[in-house]
Each structure stands twice: as structure tokens, then as C-alpha cells.
Amino acid sequence: MVVAQDMAMRKRQQIASSSKAMFIWVAAASVVVGFALVIGWFLTQQIIFREKVITEKNKTVTILQNNNKAATGLIDNVRVLETNPALNATKTQPNERALQVVLDALPADANTLALGASLQNRLLGSVVNAKVESLSVTQVGDSTSTTASHGAVQSIGFTAVVSSSDINAIRDVQKKLESSIRTIDIDSLKIEKSDASVTMTLQGHAYYLPERDLTLTEKVVKP
């Protein structure tokens, strides 16, 4: 009877010991699995982040390669323009480059003062027997500005009144506007004739193309 009790006690001790060992192994395995999952998640995030960085770098390389190719073609086009006889014949100064004509035709900024001076001295007021009675150029940024957007191109409005005792002088003013290097559109034109003079009132606008920002920038890629 005593022997049977001892055997039963030993079995219970062995079962308890096995249960403890099994619990320890399960706990250890859980720790290892949890640690492996954390390491796996961290590595996965690092791989995804590195892929994002590589993708952005590849985009930058592609842009730089395309810019280099475009620059080569642009340089060749500029060289061709410098030899263009029409541009060279239109230069305002003999020592200017032919490309300056293109820049004058479509400036990089509004420069309303330069536009007003050009209208006053070279176009409207340069015709014999024609007098500029009034001239106003819309300041870009004013609340009353009629500046319109045509894609990237911006426009500057102006109003002018020109008078002359000779109708032919008024025609010459119109021809001057047509032959202007800088593109000018006339929105409205009214001619009034009296016994002493002919008065032309016109509204129009010229264009400018804001220069592009070529500043190199940095982009932060977040994980």
C-alpha cells in the first residue's frame, strides 16, 4: 500500500515537473516568436523605406538625364537662332545677340515701365504728325488689372489715345503696332474724326512669360 502511494506521488511529481518544463519551453518559444516577429516587421519597414529611397533616386536620375539631353538640343537651337538672318536684321543694336530679339518679343517679367516707354517712344509716338494724347499701362497686381493667363503666359493691358491732323499718320501708327517685335493684341479700336483732327482710341495688351525656377531642391523621404 505504501509502495503504491510512493509510485503515485512520483508520477504526480513527474507530471508536475513535465508541466513546468513544458510551460518554460512554451514561454521561451513565445518570446522567440515575438522577437522574430518584431525583427521581421522592422526589417520589412526598412526594406520598404529603402525601396522608396531608391525609387526617388531613380526619378532624380531620370530627370537629370532628360535635362542633359534637352540641354544639348537647346544649345544647338540657340546656335541656329544666332545665325538667323531675320533675327539679326531685327536687332535694335548692332552689337546685340540675335537671341535678344526673342527675349524682347516675350520678356521674362511684366516691366510695365519698359512697355509704356516702348509704346510712347517707338510705336505710338514715333510717327511724324501723330501725337500721343494719353497712355496708361495696367500695373500688374492691381485690383483693376486685366491681366489674363494663357497657360504660363501673362498679359498686360494698356489704353492709349493718339491724334493727328493727317489720317495717314493714324494709319502709320497702326502699321507700327503691326510691325512691333513684341506681340501686341488690340482688343478695341475707335477712330473719331473732326474738322481739325482724327483721334484714335485703342485698348490692347502685350505679353510676358515668367521665367522658370531652376533651383535645385531637396526632398525628404519619410519611412
Image (tube, rainbow, N blue to C red):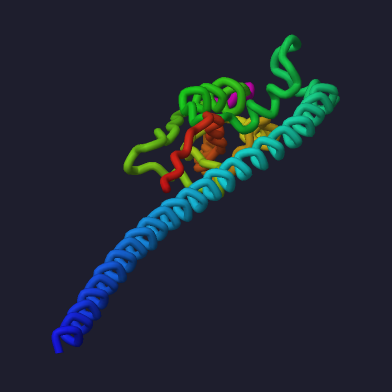
Q: Nearer the viewer, residue 209 or 59?
A: 59
> How many numbered marks appear?
0
Q: Is residue 95 left or right of residue 191?
A: right
Q: Residue at x 47, y 48 (%)?
A: 46
Q: Is residue 45 left or right of residue 120?
A: left
Toward the viewer: 87 or 68?
68
Q: Is residue 202 visible?
A: no
Q: What predominant SS class does the magenta segment belong to?
A: loop
What span is in magenta?
127-131
Place residue 179 in its image quadrant.
top right
Residue 98 image position (x, y, % from top left): 75, 21
Q: Quadrant of residue 83 in the image? A: top right
**Going 46% across and 23% down the picture, which residue do you hit?**
113
**Quadrant holding the N terminus:** bottom left
Q: Residue at x 63, y 43 (%)?
A: 58
Q: Is any part of residue 125 visible from this angle?
A: yes
| x and y, in percent, of residue 25 in the image | 33, 65
Front-lying residue, 170 or 179: 179
Compared with 161, 31 (above or below) is: below
- Vertical relation: 145 (above or below) 12: above
Q: Is residue 187 magenta?
A: no
129 within the magenta span = yes
Q: Position of residue 163 (x, y in %)?
A: 53, 32
